[in-house]
Image (cartoon, rainbow, N blue to C red):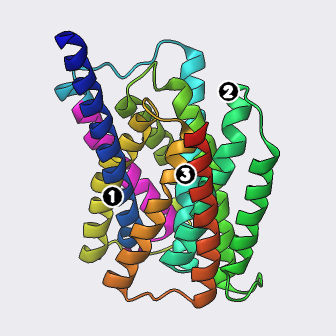
Amino acid sequence: MLILKGLGRKTMKDKTKNILELHLTFLLLGLAAIFVKGIAFPAFFINFARSVIAASVLGVVLIFVKKQKLLVNNWRDLVVLCLIGVFMATHWLTAVFSLQLSTVAITSLAMGMIPIFSTFIEPIFFKEKISLSDILLAMIALGGLFLMIPEFSFANNLTLGAIFGVFSALAFSIRSVLCKKYIKKYSASLIMFYQLCVTALITFPFIFWVEFSINNVFSWINLILLAILATVVGQTLMIRSFKHFKVATVSIQASLITLYAILFAMFFLQEIPHPKTIIGGMVIISVAAIETWRHRKR
């Protein structure tokens, strides 16, 4: 009996630790948008430098601290890990384009589509049924997305920012589901390391397209903070969370990232969201909250 009680307490402690780690992840990823807004470099260079810095830190940790080998078991795993890296590069680039074209609020609320996409994508990978109620909620969330844009026009940067934000959410959802398939086979740090290397390779050729000055100390400070806090720590914790939670569950609760990002933007950048953005965002977050309740009920 004492042993069972001890195991029960240990399980509760583990669950509490996992939930606290998840919320720390959301807090750090909420800060990512603020760091990006403080960087004056082009999107391709931001993601190239971010990947190189983060991969260097993770590589040192893996080799010298964790004493872990960097090679994977077979070619098939290498191909899939590289494919995950392609989706992460797409997610990062479109997120930065969105932030540079629009506001933190619009980008973050567009990323609120992540749980909706995950609800559809996860069953495809894990051979589960998609319910009609999920389809209905997705349509409502899409309506909220259109509603939150002050003026829907392709000539409007806010509209383009929202569109890039949606593509970023889609790439994030696919990447997350693929990560879940491999998190039991490899450590979160190693999976993240491969994604960073692939992102660096993809973005490297494009940094020569435009001329810009790298002599901006404030931008470099924000870039380093983005690479270490939001990437090495935040993204790795996000991948590790898939060991303990379903992708849809993590994605739904990740609506907190939106809340944190908007609050940080209001405090640090004095960005006050447009009333339509707030209303549309409330629709998307409400759909995410309903999905959370439904998944818990299941």
Q: Nearer the viewer, residue 124 or 42?
A: 124
Residue depicted at 78% across the width and 41% down the height: 131
Instruction: Name the quadrant of the C terminus.
Output: top right
Label 3 close to label 2 by CB (< 8 Å): no
Q: Nearer the viewer, residue 144 or 209?
A: 144
Counting other residues with Cα less than 10 Å from the Cα at mark 2, is it few (<14), some (14-19), or many (20 or more)?
few
Q: Which residue is mark 1?
A: 28
> Which amino acid lies under the numbered mark 3 shown in the image of this protein?
Ile
- The stretch drawn in magenta includes residue 59: yes
Q: Quadrant of residue 162?
A: bottom right
Q: Nearer the viewer, residue 54 or 250?
A: 250
> Is residue 94 found left or right of 36 in the rendered image?
right
Q: Position of residue 144 (x, y in %)?
A: 70, 72
Residue depicted at 42% across the width and 31% down the height: 244
Q: Nearer the viewer, residue 295 or 276?
A: 295
Q: Secondary structure at mark 2?
A: helix
Q: Position of residue 282 (x, y in %)?
A: 59, 73
Q: Quadrant of residue 138?
A: bottom right
Q: Which mark is residue 126?
A: 2
Whole-Å distance between the Cαs marked 3 and 1? 17 Å
- The stretch drawn in magenta includes residue 24: no
Judge depth for marks 3 and 1 and give the one in front.
3
> Is residue 157 found left or right of 230 in the rendered image?
right
Whole-Å distance between the Cαs marked 2 and 1? 29 Å
Judge depth for marks 2 and 1 and give the one in front.
2
Q: Which residue is mark 3?
A: 252
Q: Which residues are magenta?
A: 37-61
